[in-house]
Image (cartoon, rainbow, N blue to C red):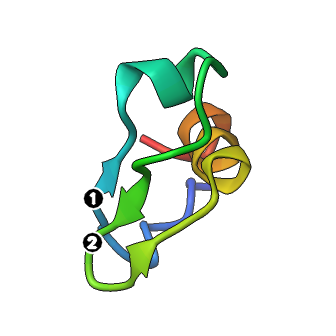
Amino acid sequence: MAAPEAAATVSLHVPADAALTISDDGCELDGYGPIPAPIAREIMTNTRSI
């Protein structure tokens, strides 16, 4: 069984301090807007995210 194609391509902007859990500010999902840092970190570390 082949891996499914990506459903969407988006850009996630996460400042280094937010990625390192030092801050919870400044995360943004292109085409959507600001998102909470915990959600950005979840997207960033998801094994299905490229």
Depth check, front residue: 11 or 1: 11
Depth check, front residue: 8 or 38: 38
Q: Which mark is residue 46?
A: none
Local crowd at mark 1 within 10 Å, few (<14), some, or many (≥20)? few
Side of 16 relative to 48 (left or right): left
User: Looking at the rendering, which quadrant does residue 29 occupy?
Assistant: bottom left
Question: At 46% across and 78% down in the image, what residue appears?
Answer: 7
Local crowd at mark 2 within 10 Å, few (<14), some, or many (≥20)? few
User: Looking at the rendering, which quadrant does residue 46 occupy?
Assistant: top right
Question: At 63% across and 39% down in the image, what residue appears?
Answer: 41
Instruction: Give the percent coordinates (x, y) of residue 32.
Output: 38, 84
In the displayed orientation, state which residue is furthest to the bottom: 32
| Three-letter amino acid code at the position of disc 1 | Ser
Instruction: Give the percent coordinates (x, y) of residue 25.
Output: 50, 45
In the rendered view, tell whether residue 8 sits above or below residue 11: below
Side of 47 relative to 12 (left or right): right
Depth check, front residue: 47 or 28: 28
Q: Which mark is residue 30?
A: 2
In the rendered view, tell whether residue 38 sits above or below residue 1: above
Please name the residue that numbered disc 1 is placed on: 11
Question: At 38% across and 76% down in the image, what residue appears?
Answer: 8
| Three-letter amino acid code at the position of disc 2 | Asp
Instruction: Give the percent coordinates (x, y) of residue 47.
Output: 66, 35
In the rendered view, tell whether residue 15 sits above or below residue 38: above
Mark toward the start of the polypeptide (2 vs 1) = 1
Label 2 vs label 1: CA separation?
5 Å
Helix, strand or loop at label 2? It is loop
Question: At 72% across and 46% down in the image, what residue appears?
Answer: 38
Q: Quadrant of the N terminus?
A: bottom right
Helix, strand or loop at label 1? It is loop
CB atoms of marks 2 and 1 within 8 Å: yes
Q: Quadrant of the C terminus?
A: top left
